[in-house]
Image (cartoon, coloured by chain):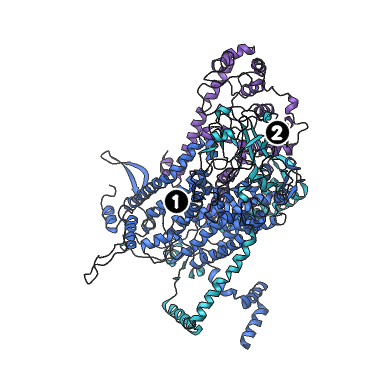
Amino acid sequence: MSTSATNESRSRGKAPAGERVADWADGRLGIYSLAKANMRKIFPDHWSFMLGEVCMYSFIIIILTGVYLTLFFHPSMNEVQYHGSYVPLQGQMMSEAFSSTLHISFDVRGGLLIRQIHHWAALIFIAGMFVHMMRVFFTGAFRKPREVNWLFGFLLLVLGMFTGFTGYSLPDDLLSGTGVRFMEGAVLSVPIVGTYLSFFLFGGEFPGGDFVARFYSIHILLLPGIMLGLMVAHLILVFYHKHTQFAGPGKTNNNVVGMPLLPVYMAKAGGFFFLVFGVIAVIAAIAQINPIWAMGPYRPDQVSTGAQPDWYMGFSEGLIRFMPGWEINLWGHTLVLGVFIPLVIFPLVLVAIAVYPFIESWVTGDTREHHILDRPRNAPTRTAFGVAWMTVYFTLLIGGGNDLWATHFNLSINAVTWFVRIFVFVGPVLTFLATKRICLGLQRRDKDKVLHGRETGIIKRLPHGEFIEVHEPLSQEQLHTLTAHEQYTPAEIGPAVDENGVERKVKGAEKLRAKLSRAYFDEDSQIPKPTVEEYKEITSGHGHH
Amino acid sequence: MKKLSARRRHPLAAVVVLLLALAATGGLYAAFAPASKAQADETSQSLSIEEGKKLYEVGCASCHGSGGQGSSDGPSLVGVGSAAVDFQVGTGRMPAATSQGAQVPRKKAIYSQAEIDQLAAYIASLGAGPAKPTSEQYSKDGADIAKGGELFRTNCAQCHNFTGKGGALTKGKYAPTLEGVAPKHIYEAMLTGPQNMPSFPDTTLSEQNKKDIIAYLHAIDSGESTNPGGLELGGLGPVTEGLFAWIFGLGALIAVAVWVAARTAKAKKS
Amino acid sequence: MSSQDIPEENLPSEQGTAHGAVSVADEKHPFADPGLPPHEHRIQDIDERAARRSERAVALLFTLSMLATVGFIVSYVAIPHDKDIFVFPIGHLSALNFALGLTLGVALFCIGAGAVHWARTLMSDVEVADDRHAIAAPEDVRAKVHADFKQGAKESALGRRKLIRNTMFGALALVPLSGVMLLRDLGPLPGDKLRHTMWAKGKRLVNMNTNLPLRPSDVAVGSLTFAKPDGLEETDEDFQTQIAKAALMIVRLQPDNIKDKRELDWSHEGIVAFSKICTHVGCPISLYEQQTHHVLCPCHQSTFDLSDGARVIFGPAGHALPQLHIGVDDEGYLQALGDFEEPVGPAFWERG
């Protein structure tokens, strides 16, 4: 004990102030072991790896601006008469929530800016999560050991959507009120308990006087609290797993190649926060968002055309718009299928993409860790599934804005709706098949490139008059990169009889798995990689074919 | 040229070609699209008849009948009043093309105001109907903008959108934008209910109500009205906001991310 | 992370092999990994003048940020909050919002741009390889944890003393019920509230615009009028909840044009009154096309035919708009002859 004490005092006496503070903290928090592992943590450089940072930073921006907004916002539905500085609403009856939002927008200096930053950042946050998720999906970054982090990310997306919904409902304006009314209708459609749920949610009949206050605590406390926790867990796992990387020279499944956190990524990632904040602030300076003063206060008997939710809820709007009006009345009860079916499909659309990683790992039966990313072309079935899913999603998004498509492209709203009704089923099949073919085509091109080299665009005339394009052989780096991906062989069901010759019962799941495995990895679904023999044969020969 | 062919294989070449193709398509569209407009201008020059009846017989009778009684091609004009004529001809909807789509669009008026007044007087003589408003009736003086806003949201916004940008109706019909429409024409449209728009007669929407609505529209949807937050983005609500967030918001951030993550240029090997 | 020790001026060829795995070709990977390519110098690494230029650029960006923050404070103090300016091509906008947003944006962006430019041009750009370690614990750790757990479980006697286990699970399962119970008072029970509106026999139809009771002669063919029940005022405490059910849409049709018999019976001289609340999810439906007599919902495009009992002809609504039976009272005003016979607005389980 005594020696360590003297050591401590000695180092304190000599060390500079910064080191002494660090020593103090280490003695209490053990920061040095943490820093040892993380201070020079390596991050690979690729722009698509920064999409997650876009999300994290916009989330932080949303929290900062949101806290500011709570200083002025009154989550109350008491009706008041407006006497603020926006002339076209003076003397109108409105809820306190709406009038305090007008106050923020017109009478608090910079309030409008913060409101707009908050809302723009929210749209960008969820768009960023969507693109980030697609990046992770198409590169196979969700594979072991990152499945749990994939689920954390997915939960963040879903919670982000609902935080957004409860947020834009708070000002109690005509547009958001219409959205809340839609929510009431959707809740009412739930069999058996729907009416009760609706009365509990709104504190009685719609709109009542409660939902703004209830949404407020959900929006500023409950959901963001959960999201903050999930985001921290997400980040810890990113650090713990170390980032994935694309195949390339020197990059293996057992290492990570890039720049150290201190100083390069500290500066790059830290700087990126300011860049994101700066870009969003400029957008909030020049582009107006959610002009609630133009929409007016909510009244259940008023509405504006073009009643759409924010973009991330758009696909649910599409679901509800393309449904036929099915309603079943039996034994004195009503089953509102026209609303209830979309309400059920809504989570299913999201779950479809969330569970995919588990389906894929079951099909491949692969239990190894994967840290090298796939190029989308090298996983044709996965890529095709992802594109098909996006087709459904974006078709529904189009359906959610069918009236604007109709007016802006001189179409009939009925025709647009019918297009959505059909294409939401046909579209994913078409894009699945097309994507798979395109992937295989790209795989073939890669193989050609490996075997025959790069087309240089230089045309050469041979002595006997023939024109050929000169092909330049690839470097070893490029050859390695283009052939680094893995190829599975389809799983077999195994012998139908066991070692004793007794017939073995083959389970249905096992058969399905073998079938899926063939669909994934047989010769129609992947182009075999070039072999060394092939390469040698061609390169040793005449050079060009 | 040699340089160009060498760059043909550049990874960005496909993007450049795509952008060029898009620009070319847009250019072609722009070059051909206005042709129909020019034709309408030409026909306007050929018309120079003065009196209402004469004007009517030449320009309108083929569809609406020689005495305004209507035909299979156009409705009766007996009793529609001078307000309807002033609106329909003044906004260029009439005369309409023989083969029209779901609805007759607004276009450049081909009659002068004097000619329209003559036509209106002739039609008004066929039977009593809503009369053209006086400028006093649609002026902003003495109007209550806030009340106008409430009336607008109750009666108009469901079709014309909360800032009067228009919206879709069934089967290709639409409520047109109110931007740039003269106050007089807005008043007449409320009074007469052109095409599929319902009318809002003085008995249910008083003269003062109409005045209020016009004043409100002027305040929020004219060249002088302010959008405090910046770009209006079409005034269409969350759809265009979402598109803007994706294209310019996320687009700009991805561009920044590409710069942050890109390799710094290496010194040239000599 | 031995790479930290490598001085930057190391020869490129050495760096190429100093770290990063080099593999040999095998059947699965026909082309061997040549290892990390040699590091190439940036111009800033070899030319001090270029490095100085970078330094000045970074400093300039940070200075710009400082100036922009000063600009923000000046704008905040100097620009009145209700001042409009015209900015091409944006249009008229709030001068304060524009100035604050731009200065804040520039101040933030320049900090970020400066930091990134610094990192890109002046910090080391030598790529470093770091080894990964398996996530799963080695076998001895795994065995130890399993053993510890088994011992702990055994010492707790949870497996042996079944009574403790079962009652504990029971208690833990029941205790959240208190929380669920507490949610009961979130709202009253529905009862038959969704079945009734303010409309009743003798209630006059009051014009939403003028706040005056309507006479049949006020309502012209082809016009559209919205009405509320007599006695409901905007300043009433329950106005929102009442109007959410009672809002009425009134149109006048030629009686010959009315195809539905009940609709004709419940009309007055061709004047029909329908609920304004869509039967789909409750939007105020009122996009009335006076020539086709169709009414379209702006939210989800349900289309109803007002000349045929307001039946659904397109879109997701499941049933017709409820009609209000109307007549004329002694003084010649339009009045309701009862409440709606069915619940207005969205369908629900008990609707039947």
Q: Give the blue chain's letter.
A: A
Q: Residue furthest bottom?
A: A2
Residue C267 image offset from top left, x and y in percent:
61, 33
The three-letter code of the residue at mark 2 reads: Tyr
The residue at 60%/57% (across/down) is A59
**Image height of B34 relative to A163, above or below:** above
Mark linked to residue B223: none
**Residue C87 occupies which quadrant of the picture?**
top right
Q: Nearer the viewer, residue A126 or A429?
A: A429
Report the residue marked by disc 1.
A389
Report the residue marked by disc 2.
C333
**Residue A423 occupies which quadrant of the picture?**
top left
Q: Nearer the viewer, residue A177 or A90?
A: A177
The three-letter code of the residue at mark 1 reads: Trp
Give how far apart the Cα atoms at labels 2 and 1 are: 58 Å
In the image: residue B8, left or right of residue A13:
left
Q: Give the cyan chain's letter.
A: C
**Residue A382 occupies which quadrant of the picture?**
bottom left
Tell me the subunit letter for badge 1: A
- Kind of element beneath mark 2: loop
**Image height of A299 relative to A1, above or below:** above
Q: Are marks 2 and 1 on the same chain?
A: no
Q: Is residue A343 visible?
A: yes
